[in-house]
């Protein structure tokens, strides 16, 4: 038993943190929300260079195999820096295509490009395809059938403007059968797992920014962070996040649906609680879109509900009665 | 990173499981907060001790098995999964013993630990006073120097188990002139049956005498029962409360077993969809607490110290425990209010969790100041 990140895994996270921290990520998020994907794609390429997207691609297709612990480390950092784009969906597609029977032409076509960062793709397994207009390919999974999208409908604005939602239009059938159904289920598990990681990172950054604010913002002649009401709310936010973290890495080691559901429920709730605390403790300025805090604030709720909602997660944890 | 147990740890788990299956009483013992139940639980401690299961993490010479933190966690998981009785010796084992290992003399360890391990001597804590709760350093009970020892004067309160226990440990003011309140305090052990001790049991919310007030009027404590140097009591006591808040007061095994029991109850009662989310939260919380503890145990095994993080632990499990019991009571419907129901005493016990071992308000201050770096303010 050694339930700790190995030195290289922790260093991988710090490397991504430094890289994204040095880039002007908030500007890339705002550009992405306005339909300018250039800065976001530049970040995407750098993440690929660091190996992020290869982590979900099988070795047979120029990837590193599925490395869930490293993926969790990476996606916490993506959440911490509000990385825009279909990062979760691209990894999910990689797992989906990688799980299709050998010799699948679509896997051969897309997996090396995903691993190398040349392709950002998205996946519609429900009502919307995230960032379909920015993606190089849109895959549509329904039942036992995988298709490409023939196109997509108009932009449906998300509560988080950096999440661009579209209804996908069914196109050519790529694969069909029970193995597709199983592959889609594995892809959905991974998407849920990575959304949990992203949510945890989002919550950690909301807490960090709010602690920083509470240390310097003065009222009644003292920093507001010296008031117990403020301290205790921030302490509760930390407790939620720190107890979600081991669930995430526990799920990384088992990759069972129940463990992933537990991690997603806890991380989603913890991030959302951190967002509520961040909004409340920043006061009115936190309620504005001009403060960069809004980039994380507006993500917390969608991430909590994206892929498996809290209710779905809890149903999976209890299993069928 | 892994969550794997070694074959030796698995064998240890199996040995514990088999022993517990053969020995755990078929019927629950009477409440340990009653005279009859206290005696029954004391006898259970002796049974555990006879086969070296009462203090698995202690060295063999004191009745233990020299188990490391992971084996201790394994034992606790099996212990609670088997539905074994509550531990009447837990104040001694969890609070006093770690202090003795860190600060006592060899002679003191040899004298005190074996009878603690066997349940022959049950220990109560004597920290709080009527005017010193969260602000413990303001305590007033004195120990006055006398020939060959000290004489205790004053009052202690909320002394868990003291209604039926044999001995107690706590801190007392030995130097009233000390510059600061937490200076001039001394850590010592005393006999609850000694002349000058009056124990007044206090009924907790359900009326059971789970704690007591202690009135001390010239109680003699020989020098051999002082732990560490006189005047160092605060530092020594804080190392104990650090332990209390840390890894060992509430083992994950207790909550994993309780969450399983709750989920079974929910299914037996028709799996009410309205309570599904709360049952799920009990299962998720128990797993989170287990994994959080594994992570901290791994840090500990790697040589790191667990500091203020233990405050995260304390707030989490104490609030978790209440929520779990509330869900159970709601599942029971009209039977939930019965005083002798399966979950009733556990619920009453859980209500004290956010108060003892450092209130959760104090814990949140510690989290905010030491982990988040927020400025100190008036409490």
Image (cartoon, coloured by chain):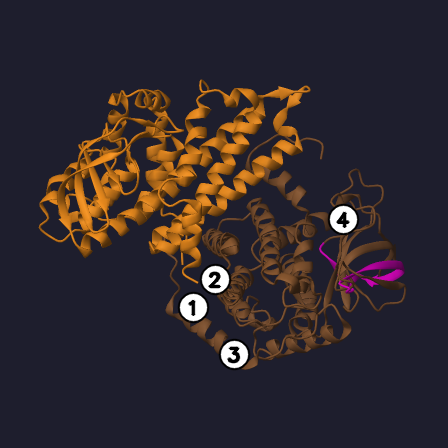
Chain colours: A orange, B brown
Looking at the rendered image, the quarter that the C terminus of chain B falls into is top right
The residue to which callout 3 is attached is B21
In this view, the residue in front, A92 or A203, is A92
Q: Are marks 4 and 1 on the same chain?
A: yes
Q: Which residues are magenta?
A: B208-228
Note whether residue A81 is visible. Answer: yes
Crowding at label 1, few (<14), some or many (≥20) Cα neighbours within 10 Å?
some
Q: Quadrant of residue B195?
A: bottom right
Q: CA distance from mark 3 to mark 4?
A: 47 Å
B86 and B268: which one is in front?
Answer: B268
Task: Work out how far the residue at label 4 is from the one at label 2, CA to CA, in angstroms.
Answer: 35 Å
Cβ–Cβ under 8 Å for marks 2 and 3: no
- What is the spatial separation of the Cα atoms under label 2 and label 3, in whole angstroms? 21 Å
Camera-side residue: B208 or B281? B281
Judging by the rendered image, the residue that carries numbered circle 4 is B231
Q: Please tell me which of labels 4 and 2 falls first in the chain.
A: 2
């Amino acid at each position: 038993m050694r339930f700790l990140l190995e030195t290289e895994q922790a260093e991988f996270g710090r490397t991504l943190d430094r890289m994204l921290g040095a880039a002007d990520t908030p500007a890339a998020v705002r550009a992405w929300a306005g339909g300018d994907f250039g800065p976001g794609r530049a970040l995407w390429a750098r993440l690929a260079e660091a190996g992020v997207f290869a982590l979900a691609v099988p070795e047979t297709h120029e990837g590193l195999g599925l490395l869930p612990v490293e993926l969790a480390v990476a996606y916490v950092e993506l959440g911490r820096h509000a990385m825009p784009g279909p990062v979760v969906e691209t990894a999910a597609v990689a797992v989906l295509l990688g799980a299709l029977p050998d010799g699948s032409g679509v896997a051969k076509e897309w997996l090396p490009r995903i691993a190398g960062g040349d392709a950002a793709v998205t996946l519609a397994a429900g009502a919307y395809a995230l960032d379909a207009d920015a993606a190089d390919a849109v895959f549509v999974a329904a039942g036992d059938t995988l298709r490409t999208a023939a196109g997509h409908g108009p932009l449906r604005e998300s509560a988080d403007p950096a999440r661009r939602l579209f209804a996908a239009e069914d196109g050519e059938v790529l694969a069909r059968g029970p193995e597709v159904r199983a592959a889609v289920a594995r892809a959905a598990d991974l998407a849920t797992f990575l959304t949990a990681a992203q949510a945890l990172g989002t919550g950690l950054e909301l807490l960090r920014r709010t602690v920083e604010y509470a240390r310097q913002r003065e009222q009644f002649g003292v920093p507001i962070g010296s008031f117990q009401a403020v301290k205790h709310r921030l302490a509760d936010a930390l407790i939620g996040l720190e107890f979600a973290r081991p669930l995430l890495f526990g799920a990384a080691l088992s990759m069972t649906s129940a463990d992933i559901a537990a991690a997603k429920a806890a991380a989603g709730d913890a991030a959302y609680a951190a967002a509520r605390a961040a909004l409340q403790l920043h006061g009115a300025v936190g309620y504005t879109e001009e403060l960069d805090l809004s980039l994380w604030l507006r993500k917390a709720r969608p991430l909590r509900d994206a892929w498996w909602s809290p209710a779905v997660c809890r149903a999976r944890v209890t299993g069928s009665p | 990173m892994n969550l794997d147990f070694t074959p030796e740890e698995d064998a240890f788990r199996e040995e514990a499981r088999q022993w517990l299956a053969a020995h755990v009483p078929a019927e629950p013992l009477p409440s340990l907060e009653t005279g009859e139940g206290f005696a029954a639980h004391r006898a259970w401690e002796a049974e555990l001790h006879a086969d070296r299961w009462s203090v698995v993490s202690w060295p063999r010479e004191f009745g233990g098995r020299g188990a490391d933190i992971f084996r201790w966690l394994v034992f606790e998981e099996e212990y609670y999964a088997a539905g074994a009785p509550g531990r009447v010796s837990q104040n001694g084992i969890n609070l006093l013993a770690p202090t003795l290992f860190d600060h006592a003399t060899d002679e003191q360890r040899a004298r005190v630990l074996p009878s603690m391990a066997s349940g022959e001597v049950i220990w109560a804590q004597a920290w709080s006073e009527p005017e010193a709760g969260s602000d413990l350093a303001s305590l007033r009970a004195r120990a006055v120097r006398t020939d060959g020892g000290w004489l205790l004067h004053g009052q202690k309160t909320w002394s868990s188990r003291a209604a039926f226990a044999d001995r107690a440990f706590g801190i007392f003011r030995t130097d009233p002139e000390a510059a600061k309140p937490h200076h001039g305090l001394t850590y010592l052990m005393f006999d609850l049956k000694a002349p000058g001790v009056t124990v007044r049991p206090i009924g907790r919310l359900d009326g059971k005498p789970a704690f007591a007030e202690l009135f001390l009027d010239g109680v003699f404590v020989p020098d051999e029962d002082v732990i560490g140097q006189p005047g160092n009591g605060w530092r020594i006591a804080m190392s104990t409360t650090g332990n209390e808040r840390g890894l060992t007061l509430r083992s994950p095994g207790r909550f994993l077993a309780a969450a399983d029991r709750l989920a079974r109850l929910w299914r037996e009662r028709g799996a009410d969809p309205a309570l599904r989310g709360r049952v799920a939260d009990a299962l998720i919380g128990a797993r989170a607490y287990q994994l959080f503890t594994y992570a901290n145990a791994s840090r500990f095994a790697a040589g790191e110290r667990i500091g203020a993080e233990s405050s995260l632990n304390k707030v989490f499990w104490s609030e978790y425990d209440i929520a779990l019991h509330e869900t159970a009571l709601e599942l029971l419907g009209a039977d939930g209010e019965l005083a002798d129901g399966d979950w009733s005493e556990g619920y009453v016990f859980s209500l004290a969790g956010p108060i003892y071992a450092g209130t959760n308000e104090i814990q949140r201050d510690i989290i905010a100041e030491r982990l988040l770096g927020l400025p100190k303010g008036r409490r």
